[in-house]
Image: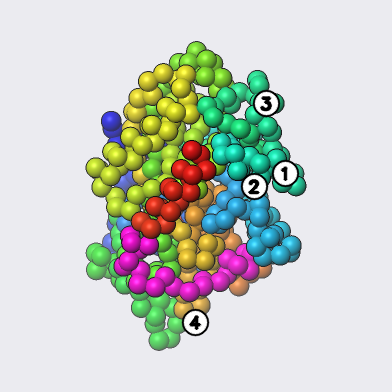
């Protein structure tokens, strides 16, 4: 089993662009993923911008994800945001998450090779409890529920499915192609990108602004700084405000069309199951199966091998007619949860010099991209669409060093619920 990131194959690695001397800019962005690069594009319209990354653009989750440009970004069912926050705020959250998809669509409009599919997402309901819930739920379009008995000829026959929740919004992409496209747009717009460079310390300046110290010893002064680090790095300004967890993916060897036909799976939609620790999967344009899931607290090669084997077991269970599902490659990366289950887009200091946007709960292709754009507007004091719950950083996680202990407990509980509901 290989452990390279499948998406990076066929791309020439980016050559290093270290920072040669100290720098003064209007805006400094830390992290060259979807959030940081989208923010940089918007900030560049109002001043000079430098983006810094520890490794290279797209090294983080943005170059590693499943490529589901879908509704998500909050730690609860986005369709139920109205119940959680009331009609107006709930509606603003749902609209934000839909607009996020349109935002990405606009950015890649002329890049046909980035898109893999264009017809929304499907949740495969396998637990009887969830099935009953969706049969009785008053769903509002674009959500609709189809009972498995009506699924014939729809092109997604999966072992054990009772019904399918359709959301006709969203599309699948090649995520690394998208991040490279964003990076090129940043260069074309005059954004300066430096890597490999790590920001180690941030100090508020007495007059105004922030000074960032890099591991190379160089310094960058900026009027405003945006932390777009997701679950990566160790910056103290983010301690207790984020809960990094691993997400992992396997990609199989290309599978013959005849096998896909006998499985009854002919479409390339974005699909996930109804578990709390959910699996996400899709057929890739070259016939591979991509199958992912969350789990794992420590990023080691042994841990990845164990998680890949678990994903393979589920893939075999769901797709019995695909034959011996052999893993070609497996990889993982960090996603960020937040104690209050919402992303946080806002300042980290009283003066409004240091900002962050993060915490998309494993769904940051659309939400991260749009949030980068929206948080940049907020930094510029321009009107923006950020829903009010996303402006609350909420309480910090007590004793963040105990994160593995908290998460082990949560994982154990969620595994138990999933087992109970799917037994
Ligand atoms: C395996 C996996 C599958 C996923 N699948 C999906 C999916 O299908 N759909 C979806 O919507 N979302 C998915 N996600 C989540 C999504 O990829 C992320 O939410 C999104 O990419 C976050 O983007 P970002 O720009 O905020 O962070 P990232 O892309 O992670 O970028 C953060 C960057 O910050 C840099 N950095 C950190 N600290 C420093 C520092 N001190 N100095 C300099 N640089 C620093 C890192 O090197 C990194 O490149 C998945 C994530 C993973 C890991």
Q: Is residue 173 above or below residue 219?
A: above
Badge 3 density bin: few <14, some 14–19, many ≥20, Cα 10 Å: few
Q: Nearer the viewer, mark 3 or mark 2?
A: 3
Q: Is residue 319 above or below residue 341?
A: above
Colour approach in the figure:
rainbow
x%, y% of residue 240? Answer: 40, 70
Badge 1 density bin: few <14, some 14–19, many ≥20, Cα 10 Å: few
In the image, is the residue at mark 1 within 8 Å of ligand 1 by its beta carbon? no
Query: Closer to the N terminus: mark 1 or mark 4?
Result: 1
Cβ–Cβ below 8 Å for labels 4 and 3? no
Secondary element at tag 3: helix
Query: Closer to the N terminus: mark 1 or mark 3?
Result: 1
Q: Separation of disc 1 and disc 2 at Cα?
A: 30 Å
In the drawing, what numbered circle is on residue 136? 1
Query: Closer to the N terminus: mark 4 or mark 2?
Result: 2
Q: Quadrant of the N terminus?
A: top left
**181 left or right, relative to 22:** right
Query: Closer to the N terminus: mark 1 or mark 2?
Result: 2
* Residue drawn at the location 45% of the way across and 82% of the way down: 208
Give residue 132's quadrant in the image.
Answer: top right
Q: Separation of disc 1 and disc 4 at Cα?
A: 50 Å
For disc 2, the marked residue is 102
* Magenta residues, start to end: 384-406
Q: Separation of disc 4 and disc 3 at Cα?
A: 59 Å
For disc 4, the marked residue is 351
């Amino acid at each position: 089993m290989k452990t390279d990131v499948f998406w990076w194959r066929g791309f020439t690695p980016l050559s290093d662009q270290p920072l040669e001397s100290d720098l003064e800019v209007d805006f400094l962005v830390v992290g060259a993923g979807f959030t940081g690069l989208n923010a940089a594009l918007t900030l560049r319209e109002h001043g000079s911008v430098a983006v810094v990354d520890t490794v290279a653009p797209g090294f983080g989750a943005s170059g590693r994800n499943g490529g589901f440009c879908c509704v998500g970004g909050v730690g609860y069912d986005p369709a139920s945001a109205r119940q959680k926050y009331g009609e107006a705020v709930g509606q603003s959250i749902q609209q934000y998450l839909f607009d996020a998809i349109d935002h990405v669509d606009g950015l890649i409009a002329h890049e046909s090779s980035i898109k893999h599919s264009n017809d929304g997402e499907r949740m495969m309901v396998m637990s009887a409890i969830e099935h009953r819930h969706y049969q009785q739920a008053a769903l509002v379009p674009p959500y609709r529920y189809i009972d498995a008995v009506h699924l014939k000829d729809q092109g997604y026959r999966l072992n054990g499915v009772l019904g399918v929740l359709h959301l006709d919004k969203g599309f699948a992409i090649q995520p690394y192609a998208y991040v490279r496209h964003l990076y090129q747009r940043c260069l074309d717009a005059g954004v300066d990108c430096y890597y490999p460079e790590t920001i180690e310390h941030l100090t508020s300046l007495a007059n105004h602004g922030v000074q960032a110290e890099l591991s190379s010893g160089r310094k960058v002064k900026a009027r405003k700084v945006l932390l777009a680090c997701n679950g990566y790095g160790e910056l103290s300004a983010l301690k207790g405000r984020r809960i990094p967890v691993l997400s992992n993916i396997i990609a199989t060897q290309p599978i013959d069309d005849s096998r896909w036909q006998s499985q009854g799976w002919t479409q390339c939609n974005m699909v996930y199951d109804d578990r709390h620790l959910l699996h996400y999967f899709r057929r890739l344009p070259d016939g591979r199966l991509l199958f992912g899931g969350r789990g794992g607290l420590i990023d080691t090669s042994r841990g990845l091998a164990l998680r890949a084997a678990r994903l393979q077991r589920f893939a075999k269970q769901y797709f019995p007619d695909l034959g011996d599902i052999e893993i070609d490659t497996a990889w993982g990366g960090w996603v960020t949860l937040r104690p209050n289950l919402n992303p946080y887009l806002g300042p980290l200091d009283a003066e409004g010099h240091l900002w962050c946007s993060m915490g998309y709960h494993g769904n940051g292709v659309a939400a991260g991209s749009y949030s980068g754009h929206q948080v940049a507007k907020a930094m510029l004091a321009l009107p923006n669409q950020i829903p009010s719950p996303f402006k609350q950083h909420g309480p910090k996680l007590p004793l963040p060093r105990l994160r593995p202990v908290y998460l082990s407990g949560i994982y154990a509980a969620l595994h138990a619920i999933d087992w109970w509901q799917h037994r």
